[in-house]
Amino acid sequence: MANRPTIVLLPIWGTGHLMPMLEAGKRLLARGGDLSLTVLNMAPPTPESAAEVTDLVRREEAAIAAGQADTIHFHNLPIIEHPPNLLEMDDFISELVQLHVPHVRDAIAGLKSPVAAMIIDFFCTPVLDVSGELGIPTYVYFAGNASTFALLLSLESNKGKEDTVDVPGLPPVPRSSLPSPLQDEASKSYKWFVYHSRRYMEATGIIINTAAELESNVLAAIADRAPPIYPIGPVLSLKPPADEPHECVRWLDTQPPASVVFLCFGSMGSFTAAQVREIAEGLERSEQRFLWVLRSPPAEGGMHPTDANLEELLPDGFLERTKGKGMVWPTMAPQKEILAHVAVGGFVTHCGWNSVLESLWFGVPMVTWPLYAEQHFNAFTLVADLGVAVGMKMDREMGNWVESWELERAVKCLMGSSEEGRKVREKAMVMKVACWKALENGGSSYTAVQRLYARAAGGQNVETPSTVEDI
């Protein structure tokens, strides 16, 4: 029905933001009621990201046509001129969102359906002016973890601190573990994050892609410092494996259980030729089985890594010497299918939160190799708080440089018989069970979605807790 109430989703264009928010919206639809979702799409700023979003929307619309007709609608916002002379991505995103505010207002005014609520990306707080003006309950969707949200809430109280900062629910955090934009308090990026953190207080609620059991200390510590919090994660898009297994999966089928360390660094991760040689030397000396997704830096003017030329990048004879116990894959690979495979026993990761959740969902312990955004902070929490990862020494000033011997040490620790590795592996399995139980009927995340549905979508007869502490 054209006039059924709708929940408006406003993501930013990155698939790491768009996909989790869309999956969260689908969870609300699954709770029942005569509702729809309306997704407002901002035009991506690069051809690569535009192609990703177009492909995603095409797949979603095909699925809707096959059985979910008239429940999810995509609305493209007008293409606007990008902000000029912005070098930092956080500045660029925030200012581009600000330029979209009048178009968001027009799009909502033009909807034929009544708007029950809005869910906006955590970069989209300028849009709170529109929802406040129109009287629409609005929730911030935080695609990262609760620890990063707590860090943003505590920015102003930590201003001027030089060595460590205090984040509610966490041990003291070294400033060296903060995201780059938050290390320079005079930068425009820092000021934008302070702006966003203040505006979070105006939201009707905060939806976080985590589970109460994963970050219980942090969630308890910020429960009275923010609007109502809904930890509904892990929010993952888990699909049945392909009919024809990927070549990486077929190779894993030949390996012993829990014997392979998987190295993969996200859609934006790549390394210099010198760093690639260090990785190869470290892996070879570790004598561990490995599956390494290796991509080259972006072409000039591009943002996304390109397929790797293995003969040019790898040391002479490396592939031959590691044949049978190692595989290097030079393009994108099905990360979730690989992490789900019984042969995978560890994951060297860039620590993007979506990748972390996928790893925990399958009970795979990690080695941290953060590259950008909030990943250094995530790496700190994975080691110091959650205890599901082995950390590595790296030089951030040299582009997150890691020596071969340090990778060798970390991989041996994770996959071998050390006490540290054993504890990390055990904790990862504990977190796997916690994630699965959280999403079961009556689990903490299932209940958080029920609470959110009851408030945002007008659900009826829902017996639910009222605070994070009750979950």
Image (cartoon, rainbow, N blue to C red):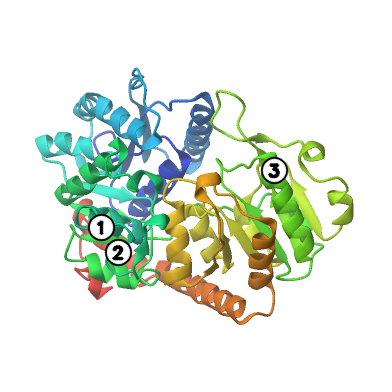
Q: Position of residue 149 (x, y in %)?
A: 30, 56
Callout 2, which amino acid? Ala
Confirm whether residue 133 shows in the render: yes
Label 1's element? Answer: helix
Callout 3, which amino acid? Ala
Q: Position of residue 76 (x, y in %)?
A: 36, 26
Callout 1, which amino acid? Leu
Q: Say whether marks 2 and 1 touch (CB < 8 Å).
A: yes
Q: Name the residue beneath numbered marker 1.
A: 452
Closer to the eye: label 3 or 2: 3
Q: Which mark is residue 274?
A: 3
The part of the image, by quadrant, that contains residue 449 is bottom left
Label 2's element? Answer: helix
Question: Nearest the camera: 277 or 9?
Answer: 277
Disc 3 from disc 2: Cα separation: 47 Å
User: What residue is drawn where x is 82% and y is 62%?
Assistant: 254
Instruction: Please tell me whether residue 137 is drawn above or below residue 421 in the rendered image.
Output: above
User: What residue is drawn where x is 68% and y is 80%?
Assistant: 417
Q: Counting residues from the N terminus, which is met first, the one under dot 3 or under dot 2?
A: 3
Q: Which residue lies furthest to the top in this view?
A: 81
Graded by Cα atoms within 10 Å as few (under 14), some (14 to 19) or many (20 or more), the crowding at tag 3 reads few
Q: Name the residue beneath numbered marker 2.
A: 448
Q: Where is residue 9 in the image (x, y as percent from the top left)?
A: 31, 40
Graded by Cα atoms within 10 Å as few (under 14), some (14 to 19) or many (20 or more), the crowding at tag 2 reads many
**Quarter of the picture holding the N terminus:** top left
Q: With 298 as the anchor, is 449 left or right in this view?
A: left
Q: With 263 as the anchor, is 303 left or right in this view?
A: left
The part of the image, by quadrant, that contains residue 119 is top left
